[in-house]
Amino acid sequence: MDRIQVMSMIHEMLYESSNLSNIDFSEYARAISESLVTTYSNSRIIPRLSFDLEPVRFGIDTAISCGLIVNEVLTNSFKYAFSGECPPHDPTLSVGVRRSADGVVAIAIFDNGKGIPESVDPATATTLGLQLVVMLTRQIDGEWELGRDGGTRWTRRFNPQTR
C-alpha cells in the first residue's frame, strides 16, 4: 500500500465516522495491516497477522501520522523480515495499540523475521521509509524504541493530549 492510499483510507474512515474529529486508530491500523497482506499476497511467504488492539481515538492529523508509521514499518517487514534462505517456521506480524492509565499511547509492531541488522541506525538512515518513521514519530512528539531480539520490534510512545 502506498502512502497516498494510507492517507486516502483515513479520509474515507473520517467521512464514514459519526464523530468527524476522532478516528478509531485501532480500526485504522487493522485495515492498513490487512490491506498490506493483500498487497503482498504474491510474495513467497505471507506472515500470519496477530492483533492486540485497544480502541484509541485520534484526530485526523495524529491518525494520518500514526497510520503512515504503521504502513512503513509493516511494509519493511513484508519486504525484508522474511526474505532469504531460512524464514521462520511460523512467520508472524503483530500490531498492538494500547493506552496507559496516564494517557500515553503505545503502538507496537513486531515481526519474528531476521531482524534489522545492528549496522542500521534508524536515526541516521538514508532510506526514505526509515527517515519517515523517525520524522513522523517526532512530529507526534513521540519516542521510538527498536528491539532486535528474535526479529524486529518497533514501539512508539506518545501522549496525544499534549499535542
Image: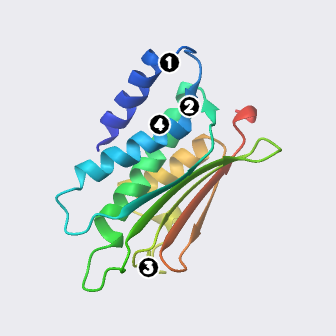
Q: Quadrant of residue 90?
A: bottom left
Residue type, mark 2 in image: Asp
* Label at residue 28: 4
Q: Are marks 4 and 3 in contact (CB under 8 Å)?
A: no
Q: Which residue is mark 1?
A: 17
Q: CA distance from mark 1 to mark 2?
A: 9 Å
Which residue matches tag 3? 117
Residue 52 is left or right of residue 131, and the answer is: right
Q: Distance of mark 3 from mark 1, alpha carbons?
A: 41 Å
| Outermost residue toward the bottom in this view | 86
**What is the spatial separation of the Cα atoms under label 4 and label 1, in whole angstroms?**
12 Å
Observer-side mark, 4 or 3, equals: 4
Disc nearer the start of the sequence (1/2) = 1
From this view, report whether residue 45 is shown above or below residue 119: above
Which quadrant of the figure contains the C terminus? top right
**Mark 1 and 2 residues: CB-CB less than 8 Å, in contact?**
yes
Q: Amino acid at mark 4?
A: Tyr
Residue 110 is situated, as x and y percent measured from the top left of the image, at 50, 64
Q: Say which of 130 and 74 sits in front.
A: 74
Q: Which element type, helix, strand or loop, lies under badge 3?
A: loop
